Amino acid sequence: MSSSTVQPEIATFAAGCFWGVEHIFLKHFPPSEKKGIISTAVGYTGGNPLVTNPTYQLVCGGATDHAEAVKIEFDPSIVTYDQLVEFFYRTHEPTTVNRQGADTGTQYRSAIFTNSDAQAEIAKRVTEEVQAKHFTPKGKKIVTEIIPAGQWWNAEDYHQLYLFKNPSGYQCPTHRLHW
């Protein structure tokens, strides 16, 4: 009897400028070290459904309501969705509405775009656990949206792996390990 292979899953997170979100996930889960992340892409999601193929300029203008996000393909037999959601919370400021550091606007909101009912349940449970352990004691409230994933558009090529190609490029100061 052959062993069955686990199907990769997709996790979709928005936590401010997508350059830094992608960078910190890949720094801690490098695909070359087989820590669970297979690949990533930065792009736009969660916006006005009438706007198709949004561009960076349009999204940054704020009129489309899309979030800058990262789509992560991962192997759930190596890293669980629970672990990725907790890591997402560790690496940004989830208590500010439409803001990460000095970056403001709906494109910088904190959001988990779920790709299944199971992911939605896990995201809600992990959010409650993180709230109780890390934010309630500080008197802060997580404002992260947890909503079903919608249409995804990859960002322009120059945004993909941006901080790996441009190590001195802009990095939001909130994109670090907070605990």
Image (cartoon, helix red, strand yellow):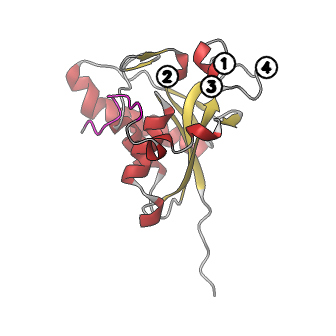
> Where is mark 3, residue-wise?
56
Of 18 and 137, which appears nearest the observer?
18
* Mark 1 neighbour class, 10 Å CA radius: few under 14, some 14 to 19, many 20 or more: some
Quarter holding the N terminus is bottom right
Q: Nearer the viewer, mark 3 or mark 4?
A: 3
* CB within 8 Å, label 4 to label 1: no
For marks 3 and 2 on the same chain, the one whose residue lies earlier in the sequence: 3
Q: CA distance from mark 4 to mark 1?
A: 13 Å
Res. 108 mark: 2
Residue type, label 4:
Leu
* Mark 4 neighbour class, 10 Å CA radius: few under 14, some 14 to 19, many 20 or more: few
Q: Position of residue 112 (x, y in %)?
A: 52, 33
* CB within 8 Å, label 1 to label 3: yes
Q: Position of residue 4 (x, y in %)?
A: 62, 75
Q: Which segment did they paint magenta?
A: 169-178
> Where is mark 1, residue-wise?
58
Can I make out residue 123 in this image? Answer: yes
Q: CA distance from mark 1 to mark 2?
A: 14 Å
